[in-house]
Image (cartoon, rainbow, N blue to C red):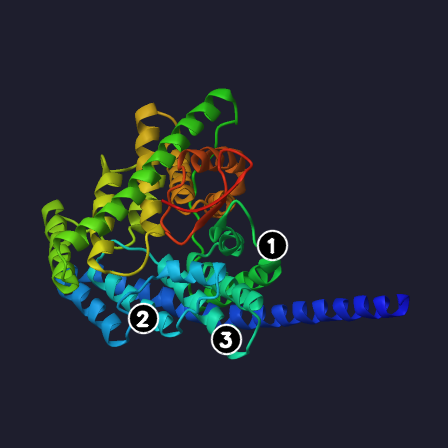
Amino acid sequence: MNTDRVKHKVKHTEERYIEMARGVVFALFMGTMLGAVGGAFYICIARVTEFREAYPWMIFFLPVTAVVILFFYHILHNDRDKGTNLVLASIQSDEDVPLRMSALIFISTVLSHLVGASVGREGAALQIGGAVGNFLGRFFNFSQEEKKTLTMVGMSAMFSALFGTPIAAAFFSLEVVSVGIMHYGALLPCVLASFVARGIAGYMGAASPFFDIGKLPGFEGMSALKVAGLAALCGILSILFCVLLRYGEHFGKKLLKNKYIRAAVLGTVVLGLTLLIGNQTYNGAGVDYINACVEGKEEPFGFLIKIVFTVLSIVAGYRGGEIVPSFFIGASFGCLYGNILGWEPALCAAIGMGTVFCGVTNCPVTSLLICCELFGFDGSLYFLLACAVAYMFSGYYGLYTSQRIVYSKFKSNYIDKKVQ
């Protein structure tokens, strides 16, 4: 009896190490492959953005491009595209993510940036990585648990390749699916894939951004209070952003039932607003504006204008995601807060970026890490406090409706509800 029990334990241990070794091999493979895809995608986005900036008249193609993107999804039988929500749902359940999603989001995101839609890149990162990971799990007939792990590995690899923040990318896919718990079983493969993908993408020319926020003040009581106040306001601002996106989608579909008419009309509205403003500050990802905010320069109420541009662009049907716009919104609001108080606008812009991101994704650990990677670890005490406060003040709202709040943000109790 004891001999049989020992043999069973040995066999179980061998199986566990074989499974772990297989996970490592696939993580390295996916990191290499998706690092190359991510590097190519980064280059494409950079080139079309440069082209639009050199030829500003490209924004006149905003209305027709929205229609083209919707038609593209239609001919590939993906009219009811759930985007990133489908990727998150596939990890929570047994849903499959079609591989064609990766090609759809790649092309449509590049087109959206070409004409100046106010969208980001993370939608493409998560959907391409998730679709590839899910496909490999199905192709090699892996178990449901292993398939979910590969989906998270793909998300981490693409996020790392595009954003240049490998530590935050490794944790993002572990944290974003179920708020309140971490999927630590995928930690090692996500870390390996993230690091490899970043190396490959960096070799191809994808930059790792770093913003210099200068010498930081000492962490003391008054400074902490100012940071906590900013973080609380950014948590509330993240709710506003999420709510406006929800209401925008609801009223857009209600008032303009035909999706092609809706795309053309809202694309025309984005074009009209751009012409009214007189520049393309709020078109595209807006990285230059983020740089300006870190330097202490911002347009009054620029964060509100960016929210309007992003909501209109998403509802129209442009693809790319909302996270980079959330960086823009947070940096703008943080810089304004710092300028009003006359206190460290660069640090406030950095905190604004991290806390609005935290509020819309419900990922405090990732938010802390992304702040440290983008702005330096010297500000980690400020970033930690800010992310904790924003996480609480953002409530149960979020960008991704498939995201689940497993444990309450306010008590140590199990609630298991979808974000609002």
Q: Are marks 2 and 1 in contact (CB under 8 Å)?
A: no
Please, what secondary structure does the residue beneath circle 1 have? Answer: helix
Amino acid beneath label 1: Tyr
Report which quarter residue 297 is drawn in.
Answer: top left
- Residue 326, position in %: x, y? 34, 46
Point out which mark residue 220 bears.
Answer: none
Give the mark nearest the N terminus, 2 or 1: 2
Give the mark nearest the N terminus, 1 or 3: 3
Point out which mark residue 184 bears.
Answer: 1
Quote the CA–CA distance across marks 3 and 2: 20 Å
**Is 159 situated left or right of 245 in this image?**
right
Give the mark nearest the N terminus, 3 or 2: 2
In front of the other: label 3 or label 2?
3
Residue shown at 18% from the left, 55% from the top? 253
Amino acid beneath label 2: Leu
Amino acid beneath label 3: Arg
Residue reaching furthest top?
222
Quote the CA–CA distance across marks 1 and 3: 22 Å
Point out which mark residue 138 bears.
Answer: 3
* Label 2 sits on residue: 104
Quote the CA–CA distance across marks 2 and 1: 30 Å
